[in-house]
Image (tube, rainbow, N blue to C red):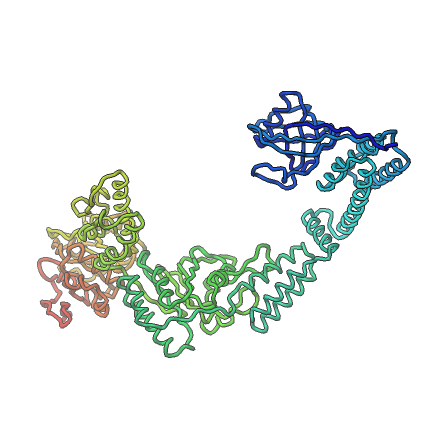
Amino acid sequence: MAKYIEKADKLTLPVIALGGITAFPAIPVNFELSDDVSIAAANAAAATDAFVYLVALQAPTEGELTAELLYKTGTVAKIKQSIKTPDGNMRVICEGYARADLLELRRFADYYAASVICKTVDYADGPDLHSEALMREGVRLLDELAAILPTLGEDTVKAAKELRSPAAFADFVAANVLVRGEDKQLILECYDPDERMECLLPLMQEETQLLRVEMEIHREVRERMNQNQKEFYLREQMRVIEEELGDGAESEFDELEARIHEAKLPEATEKKLLKELSRMAKTPFGSSEASVLRTYLEVCLELPWNAVTEDRLDIALAARILDQDHEGLAKVKERVLEFLAVRKLNPSLGNQIICLVGPPGVGKTSVAASIARALNRKYVRVSLGGVRDEADIRGHRKTYLGAMPGRIMAALTEAGVRNPLILLDEIDKMTHNAHGDPASALLEVLDGEQNKHFRDHFVEVPFDLSECLFIATANTLEGVPRPLIDRMEIIELTTYTKPEKMAIAKNHLVPKQLKRHGLDRRRLRITDEAIAAIIDDYTREAGVRNLEREIANVCRKTAKRVALGIKGLTIVKNDNLEDLLGPRKMPRDKAEGPDRVGVVNGLAYTEAGGDMLKVEVLPFPGEGKIELTGSLGDVMKESAHIAVSYLRANAERLGLPTDFYKTKDLHIHFPEGAVPKDGPSAGAAMVTALASALSGRPVRHDVAMTGEVTLTGAVLPIGGLKEKTMAAATAGVKTVLIPKGNLRDLPLLAPEAVQALEILPCATLDEVLSLALTDGCCEGAVSKAPSRTPCGIKETAKNA
């Protein structure tokens, strides 16, 4: 007599393919559908109150569904409830009916349908002894699982034990206890109830053993961990699992050890890193100390201990590169070529540290990049602006949380070689506080004798910086410590002359901006007169940054015209410049007549270059008070008092009222009062303005002057003469009075300024007054007519 009764029916049903879910007969299952095909199949089944075929996918897929992608056995189920979710998906609750084998898969209009054989197999006369034995073993294993696995609830165990059919018990346990989808599918494909139980029992036994191992791992982890350290617990759990599998962290240690040996480090450095690696191997895997040591080793191994680039010592090529990239800067170019020549003759000579000092926009940073290109060296920039902590230079000790190497080591890592050109940008912008002085930390970096063994606090081992070429930049040396200045060769980048700005604009800025804005010379042409007008009337700077901005402004407006479909060539001239850039922003003061009493053309040096600085003096009845206005600094105020004292002491000789300091108040004013002014070089101009105002003698409007004065009437040398003479020439001045001590600076002046000006050196204030006042010499001052010197500079005679 047959043990089982089989029933089979052939059906055609809508198909819902499930990912990671296995449905069993007589067991409810719920899932959410997001794809349109599955939702259409569910709707088709629900509309006819019919069944649906639930089958698991063998692997996730996003393409067309084929029979090969599905398991051969699924479950015929009935949809009990379906709900649309707010995000457009559908949540479905089904109850399995019977197992079914897939025969054929077909695509309907908007869903798939399958031809299946639906089969049910049951005992003919109930379970026999063998079936009962299988059932009891299953219940015993379920009790073991429940004892080990707290998440297996009592209700689930109770519901399973109440089942009398081994077939139903197997389906229930597979659906609620087994974890892997492959195991569940194996049970689903077993039609024979006893065979189903025989497949289930080994799987339950395996699950029990896995849970015991997992509980043992949990026990070991709990013994090692602190109750409050969740992250440490997770990492220890991972470590114990790796130990159980026999796959620890040795691979990481082996890799680091191999990298240390392959790096060919200095002996002391290699010994230090191997020691730290040994410490790391003995440290718990997830501890903070292990993370610090791992970071330390990675940072040290990323440093370029041996990688170098070969210097290109072709002097002619270097000269061409420097000339292509920059106009002027003759002194800088000459120094670089000298460095190359010496390097070519003596490769073992240490590198010199160069400091480029100049106002903003004159090309300090870009010339450093050109030097690197000329030398074929890697270029890396270290910005020091605002650095106030020594650790920014030398690094933090690795015991600190979040410690990292200093900027020098980081720059070497970025360059990838140990002999890059490192630009220390804005070295004058460093500050210091209680955490240390970064300028002091730079002393070791820039000292050729000490930087062979530079120690970063994080790296802790010496690194040779002697092959690096350091170039520093600064706007001014004020505030830079003297020991730091002594370690550098100072090269000053002075203000660009107008011809140099014209050349830079035509050869570099205009082509660059045309390319950047998608233009060419067929659509935009900026004439020389327009460039000159931009320089004179729209910018006032030592460099060319604002000049480039104004050229970019012209290009943007032209690009807009092109984008609007306006064809033709745009020619920018002086006449139509205001249409593009608006009113002229910075009209220059012009030295125009008539000659006036108490008004003198002084000369000033600013960050934007040179400028003409008018001095105005107004005497009026009073008690000898002196009023100073124009946002003057302390040095300038002292110069005013020196000027008044000199005139009081020499009033009778100079033909001034001897009691002016009793009967008159003096108001000394420097226009543009919102602009701070300071420095001693306006002393000669103040003396001249005071003498003119007190004597009533006009001052020549075509004369400008500069010079510091003393109480004895001497005129002392000043700085910024190149910029001041350029400003005088731009303002239309014909004669410039300079201190005689500045004759040494004449070769450095701009040629166009020398050609446009009559430069007269003066040693005393008597000479200044005799040349500046229109009615000749002051009384008591002796002067002779200037004579032409061989260099083309007129010189006044000394007092007798």
Quadrant containing the C terminus is bottom left
In the current view of this chain or complex, which residue is farthest to the top? 48
Q: Nearer the viewer, residue 52 or 742?
A: 52
Q: Nearer the viewer, residue 170 or 14?
A: 14
Above-or-below relation of 567 to 366: above
Would you say residue 126 is visible in this rendering?
yes
Would you say residue 637 is visible in this rendering?
no
Q: Nearer the viewer, residue 322 or 312?
A: 312
In the current view of this chain or complex, which residue is farthest to the bottom? 345
Q: Residue at x 31, y 65 (%)?
A: 321
Q: Nearer the viewer, residue 414 or 25?
A: 25
**Residue 228 on image: x %, y %:** 71, 46
Image-based side of 418 in relation to 606, left or right: right
Image-based side of 64 in relation to 188, left or right: left
**Residue 464 on image: x %, y %:** 50, 70
**Residue 76 on image: x %, y %:** 70, 29
In the current view of this chain or complex, which residue is farthest to the right? 129
**Residue 152 on image: x %, y %:** 78, 37
In the rendered image, which quarter is residue 47 located in?
top right
